[in-house]
Amino acid sequence: MGLLERKTITKIAVFAGILVLGNAVTVYAKETYQTRYDVPQKEQENYSVLVEDLDEYEVCEGDCLWNISEKLLGNGNHYMQLVRQNADVIQNPDLIYPGMRLQMKRNVYVKKRTGVNGIKTPEYRLGTPDSWAFGIIEEGEAFSNNAFFARQADGNVVCLLRDKEDAGAKSLSDWKHSQELIMDYVETHYKKQVSDLTFHKYQSENGADIFLFSYCYIIDGAQYGYTGGLTVHVSEAICQTERIQAELTGFQLDEGIEDIVLYMAGSFEELSKEAEADFSVNSYNTMLTPSGPWEVAGFHNPFVWVEEYYDGVFSKISNLPPEKKNARERILDR
């Protein structure tokens, strides 16, 4: 069943601390995830578009829009995106000059939810990958009552939902500063365990802001009685709609979790009308513990949660009788 000993999911599910009956909350998993940077025109109706902010690019000697587009957007044919995004500085696509500062953005195509896959409540809906289950994850000190996991493979995403608050909005309004705080935190507390830390920022078609960072978490097997190490791929997305903040932490042993997390964050949609004064998702009591103090106010600390989760996993299997399998095989067999 993947990385951990799963809890049995009954027909009457427990969702975020409340019993789910009737149509109040419906759980589905009917569609595969998929994110792409280039989609043929005839297929684009099947995708939602996220616009990724790539910051500024300073034109260098010998640059042309085609080469810049090929290098930064992955396809020279997309150079007209740069023209549209920088209409205030580009008067003629054939004439750009060293020193020009171009705002760089690219489209990311996310497969649309079809049918009723995912979770839908009166306040929001969220897409999930094909055949993923929903339930509780608990390992060591790590706990989530709003978790999604692959039935037949390694892969997990835990989700924290809360009403959008000033602290989170303020931290994410200055995403560059938040990135600096996160990098400083990693340098101080996880210098040996965390590598390949990358950051992204997107905006969805419905106006939601999505902030994402990914990294590799390296587990030293020696502290659990194994030789060598194990690398876990982790991706964290914070999606802010008008009144909701959804925080998604995905982790798995193989690459690809960023694609899954981006799909889920890109599919997140607020449903309640602005006129509903009593709107709140806090009543669902979603929990994601522990978090641990850090300098980035307004969203949880995924580094501590992932560390606690895998410490629980390894502490458990290190007490099992010896087997002729390495640590990775023993985890995947559980």
Image (tube, rainbow, N blue to C red):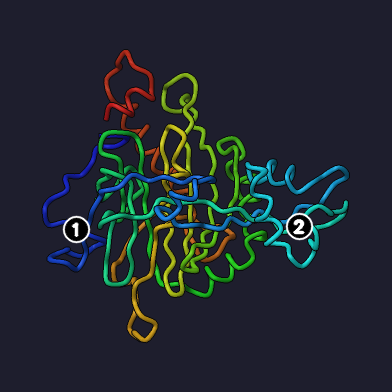
**Residue kind at label 1, given as amino acid type:** Val
* Mark 1 residue element: strand
Task: For the residues labelled 1 and 2, say whether their Cβ atoms are less than 8 Å apart.
Answer: no
Query: Counting other residues with Cα less than 10 Å from the Cα at mark 2, is it few (<14), some (14-19), or many (20 or more)?
Result: some
- The spot of residue 193 in percent (x, y) is 55, 36
Residue 26: x percent and y percent? 21, 61
Q: Nearer the viewer, mark 1 or mark 2?
A: 2
| Spot occupied by residue 136 in the image (x, y as percentages of width and height) | 26, 50
Residue found farthest to the top: 324
> Relative to residue 263, is residue 4 depicted above or below?
above
298 relative to 135, above or below: below
**Position in image of residue 53 (x %, y %):** 62, 57
Q: Compare residues 123 and 73 and report the one nearer the observer.
A: 73
Q: Which mark is residue 14?
A: 1
Please identify the quadrant where the N terminus is shown. top left
Is residue 46 placed above or below 298 in the rendered structure?
Answer: above
Write down the residue under mark 2: 102
